[in-house]
């Protein structure tokens, strides 16, 4: 059975993928200097990589993986791509959210090469999420440092949040038409990834470090960019120890037939981190 991430996205084509991102991926990330020149060459290369797929009734289409990694606007063609971010004052969802938005964009940065090196032109989706949630999960300290900057104190380890979102993106079930949710409450943050755990995986096995990626191509590509743990041990080696060091409270995992929920408790006083 073909993995869902390799299924074609209806109505998509080569024009929906950012060629600048693809060129950077080939030449800089995986060190492949043979860059396609024509549309036909691009279609052939991307089909071989799994980012596009041949069709009997027309030109190649983007796969789900190709579109969410390199697409200009993935949600235009794949409505459940992106991340739903919500923030509430209390400990439950209410009608009056402090912030509620759907963030979209590809999963990899857009860079340009200048004489002095590479320069970031456009941030990937997880960085956009980090920018959106920053005011709600951190605060400036009252005192000014010697450098004349105010130290920023984080209510949660930023790297643990990032790893949790990366895991949600790489392990979610793309056959389910819900978005990933990241929700901040007064006492916790929840990251909800659509779909049940697969292939006999359990929360206990996941915490122990067992790895069964649902979306292998997405996972491997994000590792190419060093966006995720190279060994696939982010839960055991990052999220759990970071939360223990932050406030002594272990992360909580809840697996159902519909979703996997990661809960990070705010716990004690926020810890400092540079801005």
Image (cartoon, rainbow, N blue to C red):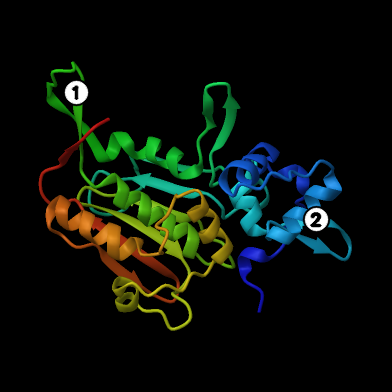
Which marked residue is nearer to the observer: mark 1 or mark 2? 2
Label 2 SS: helix
Depth order, front residue of 143/109? 109
Question: Residue 217's spot in the image, x, y percent?
Answer: 58, 62
Judge whether residue 10 can be spotted in this image. no
* Image quadrant in which the N terminus is located: bottom right
Q: Give the number of callouts.
A: 2
Residue indicated by mark 2: 44
Alpha carbons under labels 1 and 2: distance apart: 52 Å
Q: Residue at x 24, y 32 (%)?
A: 274
Where residue 51 sits: x, y (%)?
Answer: 68, 56
Tag 1: Cα neighbours inside 10 Å, few (<14), some, or many (≥20)?
A: some
Residue under label 1 = 150
Q: Which mark is residue 162?
A: none
* Rendered image quadrant of residue 99: top left
Identify the mark nearer the N-term, 1 or 2. Answer: 2
Residue 147: percent from the left, percent from the top?
Answer: 18, 18
Which quadrant of the rendered structure holds the C terminus?
top left
**Most foreground residue, 107 or 26:** 26
- Does any portion of residue 190 appear in the rendered image? yes
Looking at the image, residue 244 sits to the left or right of residue 49; the answer is left
- The residue at the far right in this view is 57
């Amino acid at each position: 059975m073909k993995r869902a991430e390799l299924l074609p996205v209806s109505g998509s084509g080569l024009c929906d993928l950012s060629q600048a991102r693809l060129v950077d991926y080939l030449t800089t990330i995986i060190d492949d200097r043979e860059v396609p020149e024509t549309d036909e060459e691009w279609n052939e290369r991307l089909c071989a990589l799994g980012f596009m797929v041949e069709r009997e009734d027309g030109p190649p289409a983007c796969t789900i993986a190709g579109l969410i990694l390199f697409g200009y606007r993935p949600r235009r063609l794949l409505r459940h791509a992106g991340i739903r971010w919500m923030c509430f004052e209390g400990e439950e969802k209410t009608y009056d959210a402090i912030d509620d938005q759907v963030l979209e964009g590809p999963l990899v940065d857009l860079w340009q090469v200048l004489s002095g090196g590479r320069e970031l032109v456009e941030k990937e989706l997880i960085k956009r999420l980090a920018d959106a949630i920053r005011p709600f999960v951190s605060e400036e300290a009252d005192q000014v440092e010697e450098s004349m900057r105010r130290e920023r104190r984080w209510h949660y380890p930023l790297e643990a949040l990032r790893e949790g979102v990366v895991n949600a993106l790489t392990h979610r079930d793309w056959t389910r038409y819900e978005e990933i949710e990241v929700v901040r409450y007064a006492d916790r943050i929840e990251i909800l990834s659509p779909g049940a755990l697969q292939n006999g995986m359990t929360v206990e096995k996941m915490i122990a470090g067992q790895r069964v990626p649902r979306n292998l191509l997405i996972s491997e590509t994000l590792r190419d960019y060093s966006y995720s743990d190279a060994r696939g041990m982010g839960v055991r080696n990052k999220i759990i120890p970071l939360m223990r060091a932050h406030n002594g409270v272990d992360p909580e995992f809840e697996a159902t037939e519909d979703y996997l929920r990661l809960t990070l408790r705010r716990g004690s006083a926020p810890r400092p981190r540079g801005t």
